[in-house]
Amino acid sequence: MFSWLEKNPFFFAVFVFIFIAYAGVVEILPDFADRARPVEGKKPYTVLQLAGRQVYINDSCNACHSQLIRPFKSETDRYGMYSISGEYAYDRPFLWGSKRTGPDLWRVGNYRSTDWHENHMKDPTSVVPGTIMPAYKHMFNKNADIETAYAEAFTIKKVFNVPYDAENMPKLGSWDEAKALAKEEAAAIVGQMKDQDVKDAFERGEIREIVALIAYLNSLK
């Protein structure tokens, strides 16, 4: 058979193509599928983090900040390890971005604190002199939409099969329980903040957008 193929270049080329294609499928696809799965320790966003993610989208933060670290030394030296596909398993939609007017934020939770984010969103130049980023003071006065975030969690679970279950997100099944968890998570953030209006609002049972946004940014690690 092989001697016949050697005498027929066209069929030999077809045979080589099929052989290489088959080998590629066998070797590449299983690894590709594995990389698409959530990395170890990666969990879906909490309801509060989803509310903050929506604030991030609504205020077009992704227009100036990317969430994708490329495998170049100049990027990993500044932002940390390069991004891998399994880290985005729970992102609907992806917020990779296409422009960096500001720095990449994919691992911002590793090097920025709640206090830093609070000051930066209220008065950017107070922590980054010369920055062109505008202040987002309205986030300190407007309540986060926790109810819509809760509905989004269910939508993601049902439509995209993201595993919001008892193992990685307890008590999602009940709105009252999910709201209590969001309040518990928010309490830890509010406790680290200085803005008295935000604290007073939380005492009244209100969670400001800035609190939800910080919860989201702190989750980016």
Image (tube, helix red, strand yellow):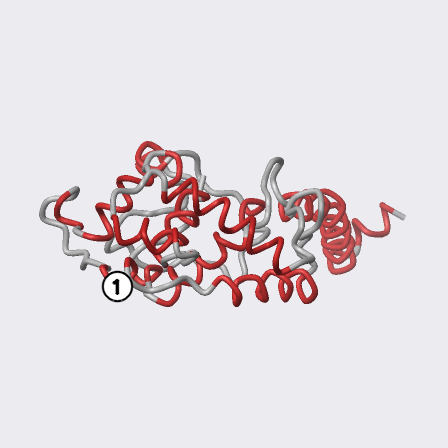
Q: Is residue 6 left or right of residue 129?
A: right
Q: Secondary structure under badge 1?
A: helix
Q: Amino acid at mark 1?
A: His
Residue closer to the observer: 92 or 180 = 180
Where in the figure is residue 217, as x and y percent of width and height?
Answer: 39, 47
Residue located farthest toward the right when viewing the structure as drawn: 1
Residue at numbered disc 1:
138
Residue located farthest toward the front when viewing the structure as drawn: 204
Residue closer to the observer: 165 or 99 = 165
Residue closer to the observer: 60 or 152 = 152
Q: Is residue 41 left or right of residue 19?
A: left
Q: Is residue 219 above or below residue 111?
A: below
Count of numbered labels shown in the rendering: 1
**Residue depicted at 48% across the width and 52% down the height:** 49
**Residue depicted at 49% across the width and 50% down the height:** 183
Q: Is residue 125 above or below residue 176?
A: above
Residue closer to the observer: 71 or 6 = 71
Count neighbours of disc 1 (C-alpha within 10 A) and say few if under 14, some if 14 to 19, many if 20 or more: few
Q: Is residue 34 left or right of residue 5?
A: left
**Residue depicted at 43% across the width and 34% down the height:** 81
Q: Is residue 31 above or below residue 210?
A: above
Where in the figure is residue 85, as x and y percent of width and height?
Answer: 55, 47
Q: Quadrant of the C terminus?
A: top left
**Residue depicted at 76% across the width and 45% down the height:** 26
Where in the figure is residue 58, as x and y percent of width and height?
Answer: 37, 67
Where in the figure is residue 88, as x and y percent of width and height?
Answer: 54, 50
